[in-house]
Image: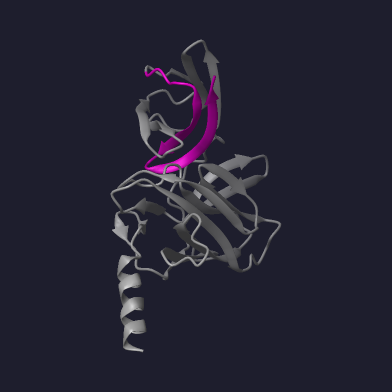
Amino acid sequence: MILSVLFLLVMSARAQSFMFYSGDQPLDDNAEITVSDYQVFMTNGDNTILSMESGLQLKNITESDVQATVTQTILEGPTDGVNGYLSFCFMSCYTGNSDRTLNGSIGAGSFAPGYHDNFYVYQGIYNRIKVQYTVYLTGDASQTDKKTVTVTYVYDENSITRLNTPEVKPELTVFQEGNRMEFSGSFASNTCQLEIYAMTGQKIAQHLLTSAANETFILPEKLTKGVYLCVIKQDKQTIISKKFIVK
């Protein structure tokens, strides 16, 4: 009996591959947070879409690259599934109110590239959803080394805006000509940042995009053939995450 308890204690102590962060603050395992403020994301005709940002970041706290599996599990809601939908990003982005499982590599001691969670709602239509995010080592069926955080997104009469200016919905086009890579898009801020990652999680390039409209950026780095991830950030939040292939 004593040996079994000691074994479990040792395994628990070793289970330290990942850490969720809220901003710059690490979160305990099974932490629960509530998000009630929002950003005005986009105005489209008579509809104004609001983005409720979890602010979560995911970090590999080991000294080796790891293959990670990240899940999104809906625990409650939404109270209005027509006028509210989740967005979940890890290497690729998906929207919709359904459970998701995504896989990818995170570099040693690095934050997961393009990791992002939020809930979109429509202005004036109150909504609520409770979601659990879990990360564990890919292939670990028993999930002995995992971290979990639960986020409740609440849009109600007490919610307040953190960004008053409606944004233009961001878009990104990747074009290759020879060994030249060109990135084109239209962004709502002149302080957006472009980051390029290999599929191993290694950051290849990082550049500031200084033009707010119809930006065309030619990557100075020469990329070898393969699959990469382009991430556009605004105020440290990921607003676009897109895979592209260099031929």
Q: Quadrant of residue 128?
A: bottom right
User: Residue 107's spot in the image, x, y percent?
Assistant: 36, 43
| Residue 112 colored in magenta in the image | no
Quadrant location, the C terminus: top right
Q: Answer whether residue 246 is magenta in the image.
A: yes
Q: Residue furthest top?
A: 178
Span shown in magenta: 221-247
Q: Is residue 148 above or below residue 181?
A: below
Residue 19: image location, x then y, percent: 35, 58
Q: Position of residue 243 (x, y in %)?
A: 54, 33
Residue reaching furthest to the bottom: 1
Relative to 59, is 217 on the left or the right?
right
**Residue 8 vertical placement versus 64 (above, below):** below
Please state which of residues 217 and 139 is positioned toward the viewer in this rendering.
139
Residue at position x 46%, y 53% in the image: 161
**Residue 92 position in % (x across, y down):** 55, 42
In this image, 6 relative to 89: left or right? left
